[in-house]
Image: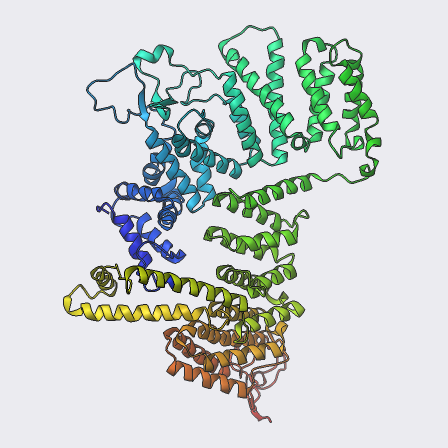
Amino acid sequence: MERSDGVRTTLEFVFSVHPTSTVRLSEAAVPQKRGANITQDALNLACNLLSTPASVPPEEWYAAVAPQLLALLDKGNDEPELVKAASYIIGFGILGKRATGAPGTAGWKYFAEPMLFRIKPPPGLPGATGTEDSEIIDLSKDKVIVSCTDLSTALRRLHALVVAHPNPGLCKRLLSPLLLSLWTLATWDETVQQTVVERVCEPALALLKIFLKLTPSPDLILLLVQNMGYVGGYNSSSPEWMYKAINDSEIAIVDTKQPIRSASASSPRLTLEDIERKVPKLLDLVTSTLSDADVSIAFLELFNSWLKSARRSKEPSIMIKQDQEQEDPISRLVEMRTLQAMMEKFPEKLATQPKHILNLVSQILSNSGEKAEDEDEVISVALSLLNMIVTTPGFQKSRVNPETLALIESSLDTLAKSPADFSQTASNLRLLLLYRDEVDPAESTSAAPTDRQVEDRKTYSLAISYITAPDSPPPVRSEGVNLLSTLITSRSPVLDIPGILVLLGGLLADEDEYIYLRVIKAYTLLCDAHPRSVVRELTDRFVDARETQALDARLRAGEALLQVVQRLGETFTGDLARETATALVTVAGRRPRRPRTEARRQREKAARERREREARDAWGGEVPDFSDPDDEDEDDDDVLGTGGGGGNSSLTREAKRRRKEVIERIVQGWEGKRGSEDVRVRASALSVLGAAVEANVAGLGRELVSGAVDLCVAVLQLEREEEKGILRRAAVMFVLSFVRALEDAREKGRDLGFGFGARAQEDVMRTLRYVAETDNDGLVVQHARDVVESLENWQVVRLMPSRTAAAPAFGGGLTRLAGLEVNPERSAPAAGSGGPGPAKPRIEEVE
């Protein structure tokens, strides 16, 4: 990879020549040279080529390819396909493997550290960027370690890596060391330039949200509160570097260990304005990333932390340095302001854990009853919490622990008699507790949810929010599908099955392959408990009678239906199997018409012709072709291995032209004519039908199976067009699936009630032999020959008894043939018969 664009050239070559590369109709006559239509197989091949060094040491290989792959992450919206490819190679091929992606390995050194160390420099302070070679160094100015440009580039590349091709595990590993750094950059003062906000602050906030959604932990929120004034470094009292606005309010990382500044190199104090600016941003972050239960837990932990520091400050003790740091009044002010803001903004979220809050309130009130004058602030907050819980709709005193309730009531009686300012509040709360059940008696008998139900509801709401949020990036949506899968596996009763089916159906149209493949897996898990709902939902989406689904969504629904049918196996029977098979036969046939789809195609065709006509008018004739014929011929020579000789150039160009025409004709033929069904959907229907036959042929019934076989024969005989090749392949493979199902039933000794008659076998064999000799599709010919051979073998094997028959005495072998009865057991002496010798074998001819 000595060439500066060697990685990009390799990617483009693999994507253009890989057999699985697809071509859109509008691109059928244009060489695919910019990474368009990248398939997963082609991406895997490119990943193996670039992520695994063959004959050079990993250090040397990654040192050469890392700058080029990281540079591809900067393409953004200009070339998103290449960004996805580079993200997949880095995230899955290199950093996703323990041997190359663990800290300390070559892959981590050359791919992760260049991004991480420009956002959070390592403990060993590096040299300055851009000032090392200067002869004159001004010690009165800040020494820049990482410039604003390098910082924004690292954030942009890291965001592209975790979003373009999601890998939740890698995302957590990359972002966990940067939590405080991302928090500082995301909550930076708005006085910086708008361009800096877009380049630094917004990407940092997006990465912070992704990490908190992937690891929704109340401890992380408490960590942010305790480090709200973080400005950089690894030592909060004297950081070795910090984030600072320089050069017209640009954000950079500067060195704080210069000799002239060493005496005053300390962390800037957090001002009241900073607190008022950052607390609302923290609450917005909490609301968008944590569930109600997590918010309540974070509030309780924060309240406990504040309570300990508040009571410790009241106790007389000898102050030491460590205590002074822990009892920082600014930290107490931050905690108190955050608690107040949380109680004001979302009291209903805090009330999701009433049991824990009431226990905490009872402890505070009971311990402070005799010295209320020393803890007025603490008691006021406790009374506010109690009022918030008691006045919450749905609160019932009968659900509270009697001991806790008695302790609270006695403490309120004591506080009501005290001369403090809050005595009237305590008296009012005592009366409210006394008559609270009479306020809403209808709910007094309703059963309280169990701990598992509470936890499942929390997981369910979190998964739905991750999936449905309009700004959820792919890693977060993927995590939402994972959470749903865990609930489906545990068969949680909180699941809304119709809603989940609609949600998963919408995700089938997701552009990211990493998402919809997980959705298909979720369908297969859900079918274990709800087979009818899942199969009917997928069948409706695949048939698409209302013509509202895109082609890709229908094909993915067909893939999900195939896997669901295979998972159901012999349980796929009855009315459900017959309804599904009927729908599949209807889709696979030639008669379905789709008028809305045809009208849409006509509109697209008219618009395309109008654009072409306007282009011809603008050029005053035919639009010239700006593609380089020499470059195209060179590409073809590389692919075909013919070299670039001038004698073959005209032949190569003619072959290329014919290939373009064939591809364009096939793609146009796939869409169907006069409103007919898309050929790809029909082929998919036959594939799913073949899987259903192999899963449980008896469950479909004789009429459906016979009709499907007749349909396949008709497809092979009548639909001989070049673009119908994929449909004929599916028809041939269905015949093979039918034969496999019959053989499996014979081996198991099952009576299907129908079979494969001699006349039907003759018709199918004759058709397949004809197809094998005359078809214009190589794969169809090969499949037909294989199925003919399989049918001939099956015709011989079916004359032998099934394996379920009694095994012969001589360890297996031939026991019966049609027209003859051979019984070797008669030739062996009976055990204990004491006969003089073996009886003579007897061969009987039977009718």
Whole-percent x and y of residue 292?
63, 35
Whole-percent x and y of residue 94?
36, 45
Q: Nearer the viewer, residue 651 or 132?
A: 651
Residue shown at the point (62%, 63%) measured from the top left: 536
Residue 65 quadrant? top left
Whole-percent x and y of residue 249?
37, 24
Give the side of residue 112 with respect to residue 461, left or right.
left
Give the side of residue 294 with respect to residue 629, left or right.
right
Question: Compared to 19, does 718 lie above or below?
Answer: below
Question: Compared to 249, does 19 lie above or below?
Answer: below
How many dots with numbers?
0
Question: Compared to 275, does 287 lie above or below?
Answer: below
| Identity of the residue furthest to the left in this view | 646
Residue 546 quadrant? bottom right
Q: Nearer the viewer, residue 61 or 341?
A: 341
Res. 419 in view: yes
Residue shown at the point (47%, 36%) measured from the top left: 206
Whole-percent x and y of residue 472?
51, 43
Res. 22 in view: no
Residue 831 quadrant? bottom right
What colouring style does the render use? rainbow
Residue shown at the point (68%, 42%) measured from the top left: 453
Picture quarter with the C terminus: bottom right
